Image: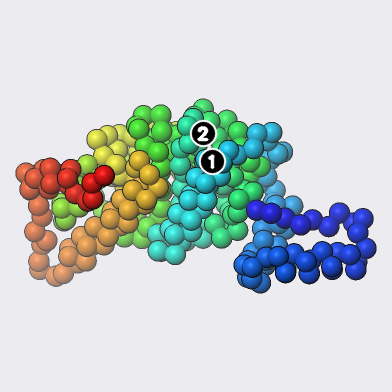
């Protein structure tokens, strides 16, 4: 994000002229300038920042970061997270771009690129990476995933407290590889949680985290996000159906789900 800093050597009038000129050149409006100003203030004072790292983001990384920030903001807009909960990552080569710890997504800009290598060593940015980094890295080390989305979605989190596996309430479970498992509880950000998550993800592209939330992955951010949204929707459907007094939801059989899985292989546009 382009910034205009006043270093104290300009006169007050010159600084005003420079700001006026900047307003004239910036077609994005007052709201954008206010957002930049808040982000600039945050960069100057945030105690979560480390010393600046030497490497600059490549063009590909910068583009991926913009997509990551847009996806992170979408999790808030769609009600899948509250505040700074949840996190998003995307892999570019051997670098994993991740949302930083405790940062409101609407305050993230192009200058806030945060990236680590596959060992967790920070290689890009000055903000401390998400505390859930072990989960994200575990996915990238063991699968071909290029993106991971973790949320605290309400219905999915509720279901994670009730069952060990989401009942087969809808055929879209096939889009996640089969019945969605619940990873056993462990403290957030721990290696134990990452290990529990991997067991639940075996053969799957999504799982629930007991008393915590969801994790999904995919070959793109859009696919990882879509799986998160589908998982939350299925949890909501099951909770709604199972709450009707004196009635029990009819569930799909494993064979029915397998048939859907075969059909999904050819789903969507080709080419």
Q: How many marks?
A: 2
Circle number at residue 61: 1
- On the rendered structure, is 162 left or right of 111? left
Do tag 1 and tag 2 residues touch (Cβ < 8 Å)?
yes
Of residue 206 and residue 28, the one placed in the foreground of this image is 28
Q: Mark 2 = which residue?
A: 95
Structural distance between the alpha carbons of marks 1 and 2: 9 Å
For the point 83% across and 57% down, the residue is 6
Asked where in the image residue 230 lies, by quadrant, the reply is bottom left
Q: Residues within 10 Å of mark 2 (few under 14, many from 20)?
A: many
The answer to whether any part of residue 212 appears in the image is no
Residue 242 position within the rendered picture, expressed as x and y whole percent measured from the top left = 17, 63
- On the rendered structure, is 252 left or right of 159? left
Residue 131 position within the rendered picture, expressed as x and y whole percent measured from the top left = 52, 43
- On the rendered structure, is 118 left or right of 34? left
Of residue 246 and residue 13, the one placed in the foreground of this image is 13
- Secondary structure under badge 2? strand
Q: Earlier in the sequence, mark 1 or mark 2?
A: 1
Quick one: quadrant of the C terminus? top left
For the point 32% across and 56% down, the residue is 229
- On the rendered structure, is 197 left or right of 50? left
For the point 59% across and 54% down, the residue is 108
Against 210, residue 229 (above or below) is below
Of residue 231 and residue 114, the one placed in the foreground of this image is 114
Residue 26 position within the rendered picture, expressed as x and y whole percent measured from the top left = 67, 65
Circle number at residue 116: none
The answer to whether any part of residue 195 appears in the image is yes
Residue 135 position within the rendered picture, expressed as x and y whole percent measured from the top left = 43, 38
């Amino acid at each position: 994000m382009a910034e205009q800093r006043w270093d104290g050597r300009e006169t007050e009038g010159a600084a005003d002229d420079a700001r006026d000129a900047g307003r004239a050149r910036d077609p994005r409006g007052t709201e954008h300038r206010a957002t930049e100003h808040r982000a600039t203030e945050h960069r100057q004072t945030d105690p979560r920042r480390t010393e600046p790292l030497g490497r600059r983001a490549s063009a590909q990384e910068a583009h991926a970061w913009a997509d990551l920030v847009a996806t992170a903001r979408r999790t808030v807009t769609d009600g899948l997270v509250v505040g700074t909960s949840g996190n998003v990552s995307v892999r570019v080569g051997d670098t994993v771009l991740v949302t930083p710890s405790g940062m409101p997504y609407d305050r993230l800009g192009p200058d806030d690129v945060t990236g680590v290598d596959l060992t967790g060593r920070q290689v890009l940015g000055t903000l401390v990476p998400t505390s859930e980094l072990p989960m994200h890295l575990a996915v990238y080390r063991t699968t071909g995933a290029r993106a991971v989305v973790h949320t605290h979605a309400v219905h999915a989190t509720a279901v994670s407290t009730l069952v060990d596996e989401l009942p087969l309430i809808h055929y879209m479970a096939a889009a996640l590889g089969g019945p969605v498992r619940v990873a056993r509880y462990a403290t957030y950000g721990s290696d134990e949680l990452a290990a529990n998550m991997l067991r639940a993800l075996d053969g799957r592209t999504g799982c629930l985290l007991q008393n915590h939330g969801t994790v999904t992955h995919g070959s793109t951010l859009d696919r990882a996000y879509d799986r998160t949204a589908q998982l939350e929707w299925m949890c909501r459907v099951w909770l709604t159906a199972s709450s009707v007094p004196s009635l029990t939801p009819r569930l799909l059989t494993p064979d029915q789900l397998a048939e859907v899985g075969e059909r999904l292989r050819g789903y969507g546009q080709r080419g």
